[in-house]
Every structure is written in C-alpha cells, then in structure tokens.
Image (spheres, rainbow, N blue to C red):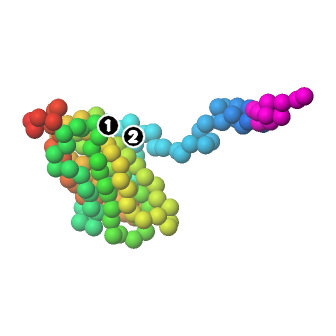
C-alpha cells in the first residue's frame, strides 16, 4: 500500500524547489528598490539631494509630524507623519543627530493617503524632519525630540 500523504508531500517539494531556487538567485527582483546613496549620506543636505533632487524643502505647517517630546528609549521612537496636501508622491523622515540622517522613505501610490507611521532610531537629542514630496516640490516640518539615556531624563 502506498502512503498518499508521503507522495503528495514529495510532489509538493519537487514543485516548490525550482521556485525557491529562483528566489534565492534573484532576490533583487522581488524586493523593493531603495536609494542607497540617500540612505548612506552622512549629512542632511546630501541625503535630501540624493533622495529628492533638492536639499531645501519649503517649511509648511500642512506637514504634521507627531513624535514624543521626550523619548526614553532612542532605539524605538514612534513617529507619525501626515499631511493635507494633495498629490503627495513620497514621505521621508530625517533624524538630524544620526550619523546617517535619512531614517525612512516611503513612496506612495496615486490612491494612497499621505500618512505614515513607524518607529525610528535616534542617536541623541535632535530634530526630526518630515519631508513630503508633491510632484517636483517638497515641503517639510520639524519637531525636536529629547532622547534620554536609560530613561533618566538627562
């Protein structure tokens, strides 16, 4: 008597094998692209220039950044960025005090709401800058976040 469960398992593994090999050989085809030059930039100006093509976004109160005034753990600072501006194509978050300031970049589809929420790592007390791209123009707003060491308020 032939064990049908074993036969089904063998057939399934033979079918999955080539797919697994294709994924292992070409992971770049399946993963989202990222702007390596922007994320590896060590200063704010070059990070924004590599990401947006311009290093000077206009300040705009329509860009709202929500983050704690005091972060007890700089490794996980919650940040939310939203805007009422129409036709937003991208949102980026920059931590000025980090060695590499660009900490997050989101490309939005045409039907997406201009809202992102994430957690970022901050090396020290510094400004968080939210940058919103609208076509060829970019807008920003800033919030200072005090990072305490060990949650001691210092």
Q: Quadrant of the N terminus?
A: top right
Check disc 1: other Cα within 10 Å, few if <14, some if 14-19, many if 20+: some
**Dot 1: element:** loop
- Tell me if 4 is positioned left or right of 34 in this view: right
Which label belongs to residue 34? none
Which label belongs to residue 39? 2
Q: Quadrant of the C terminus?
A: top left
Instruction: Kindly identify the residue that appears in the image at 56 percent across and 42 percent down.
Output: 31
Give the camera-side residue of 136 and 74.
74
Q: Is residue 47 visible?
A: no
Instruction: Kindly identify the residue that appears in the image at 42 percent across and 65 percent down.
Output: 113
Q: Position of residue 14 (x, y in %)?
A: 79, 32
Q: Quadrant of residue 84?
A: bottom left
| Residue 2 to residue 116: above or below | above
Q: Disc 1, disc 2: CB below 8 Å?
A: yes
Residue located beneath label 1 in the image:
100
Residue range highlighted in magenta: 1-13
Task: Check if residue 131 falls in the magenta segment.
Answer: no
């Amino acid at each position: 008597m032939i064990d049908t469960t074993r036969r089904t398992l063998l057939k399934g593994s033979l079918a999955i094998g080539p797919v697994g090999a294709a994924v292992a050989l070409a992971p770049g085809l399946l993963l989202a692209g990222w702007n390596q030059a922007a994320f590896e930039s060590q200063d704010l100006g070059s990070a924004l220039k590599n990401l947006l093509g311009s290093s000077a976004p206009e300040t705009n109160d329509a860009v709202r950044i929500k983050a704690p005034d005091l972060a007890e753990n700089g490794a996980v600072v919650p940040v939310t960025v939203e805007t009422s501006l129409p036709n937003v194509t991208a949102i980026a978050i920059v931590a000025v005090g980090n060695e590499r300031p660009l900490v997050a970049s989101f490309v939005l589809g045409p039907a997406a709401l201009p809202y992102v929420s994430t957690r970022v790592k901050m090396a020290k007390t510094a400004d968080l800058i939210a940058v919103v791209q609208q076509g060829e123009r970019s807008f920003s707003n800033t919030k200072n976040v005090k990072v305490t060491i060990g949650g001691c308020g210092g």
